[in-house]
Image (cartoon, rainbow, N blue to C red):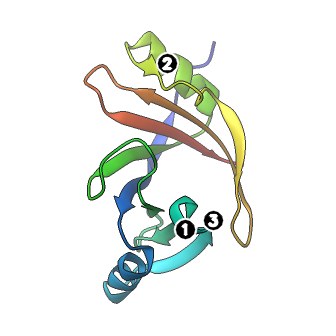
Amino acid sequence: MSKSTVKGLHHVAINVKDMDVCIKFYEALGMKLLRTWGEGGQAGAMMDMGDGSILEIFADGDGKGAVGVIGHFALDVEDADAAYRTALEAGATPDPGWEPKDIVIGSEPPYPARVAFVFSPTGERVEFFQVK
């Protein structure tokens, strides 16, 4: 069985009350809007922080945390399935419904990835993000 290889931070996700205000704020700080998707409470966006790391923004939260706090952080991994197994072996618990799976973030252009979420032994919500 292969072990997880973390390449670095992929993104940090925040839950916000106003997507437009948030995007404008971070654009003013020099971040570049990469993609948006969804509408209303289902809207999301990704912004380049300047070094390739991404700030992911969810309107009305992503259902996992309060507005104004970090919802999760994502590690850029070679193999999301291996990272998930390694995390469970190290004491993490699965985030139900977020076992390793392929997704396409419905943006323009579409952004395919393989992702998995766990809760660390101390409670943080961690995403393993494998760019496809």
Residue for badge 1: 40
As measured in the structure, the alpha-carbon distance from the residue carrying label 2 to the one carrying label 3 is: 32 Å
Query: Is 63 located above or below residue 13 in the figure?
Result: above
The numbered mark, 2 or 3, whose residue comes first in the sequence reads: 3
Q: Residue 86 carries which label?
A: 2
Tell me how far mark 2 sits from mark 1, CA to CA.
Answer: 36 Å
> Residue at 71% of width from left, 45% of height from top?
103
Instruction: State which quarter of the image contains the N terminus.
Output: top right
Which residue is nearer to you in this view: 96 or 73? 96
Identify the residue at image location x=46%, y=50%.
62
Q: Distance between the residues labelled 1 and 3?
A: 7 Å
Q: Dot 1: within a 10 Å radius of its alpha carbon, few (fewer than 14), some, or many (20 or more) residues?
A: few
| Mark 2 surroundings within 10 Å by alpha-carbon count, few (fewer than 14), some (14 through 19), many (20 or more) | some
Residue 131 placement, left or right of 54:
right
User: Which residue has dot 3 on it?
Assistant: 38
Q: Which of the two discs, 2 and 1, labels the residue nearer the N terminus? A: 1
